[in-house]
Amino acid sequence: MEEFDYEATDQGAGILAALGAGIMIVYLIIFVLVIIGLWKMFEKAGKPGWAAIIPIYNIIVLLEIVGKPIWWIILLLIPFVNFFVGIYLCHLTSKAYGKDIVMTLLLIFLPFVGFPILGFGDAKYVGPPKD
């Protein structure tokens, strides 16, 4: 009968726990950066900044900023459709702050960089874009 090496198992579990904690800390930092960026972005548009921390309401405020009706939330609940609507909302958001396709790509791929740039940068809210 073979003996089981409990020491190696404990060490592996410790490594996995540390890795999981590290990933969680990075995720929380990214989450906080997006929230802070949204908060400042909402304030620039004349909306309450605290709306950035309220789920679903923050989407309603974003829809108001880009000039789309509230019923678009339904589109964000439909699988596959939500992917394209989300990309379009990122594009409309960048246009609402006077930015171009580069900002759209930043909002899509690196939102933890894009939203703080819109919030703290020189971007001015110019109103809902004209499609």
Image (cartoon, helix red, strand yellow):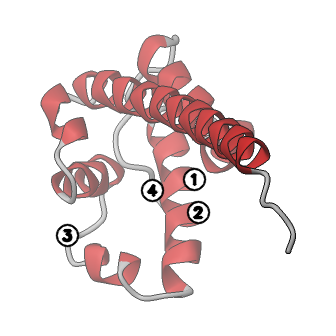
User: Is residue 12 left or right of 47 when viewed as pictured?
Assistant: right
Q: Residue at x 57, y 74 (%)?
A: 83
Say above or below: 51 vs 82: above
Q: Amino acid at mark 2?
A: Ile
How far from the left and from the top, in percent, is residue 67? 30, 57
Mark found first going from the N terminus, 3 or 2: 3
Mark 3 or mark 4, whichever is nearer to me: 3
Q: Amino acid at mark 4?
A: Lys
The residue carrying pointer 1 sits among few (fewer than 14), some (14 to 19) or many (20 or more) residues within 10 Å by Cα, namely many
Q: Which residue is mark 2?
A: 87
Say above or below: 35 vs 93: above
User: Is residue 45 left or right of 14 when viewed as pictured?
Assistant: left
Q: Residue at x 30, y 64 (%)?
A: 68
Say above or below: 3 vs 102: below
Q: Amino acid at mark 3?
A: Ile
Q: Which residue is mark 3?
A: 70
Q: CA distance from mark 3 to mark 2?
A: 17 Å
The image's mark for residue 55 is none
Mark found first going from the N terminus, 4 or 1: 1
Q: Which residue is mark 4?
A: 130
Q: Which residue is mark 1?
A: 91
User: Is residue 101 left or right of 34 when viewed as pictured?
Assistant: right
Q: CA distance from mark 4 to mark 1?
A: 12 Å
Mark found first going from the N terminus, 1 or 3: 3
Q: CA distance from mark 3 to mark 4?
A: 17 Å
Mark 2 or mark 1, whichever is nearer to me: 2
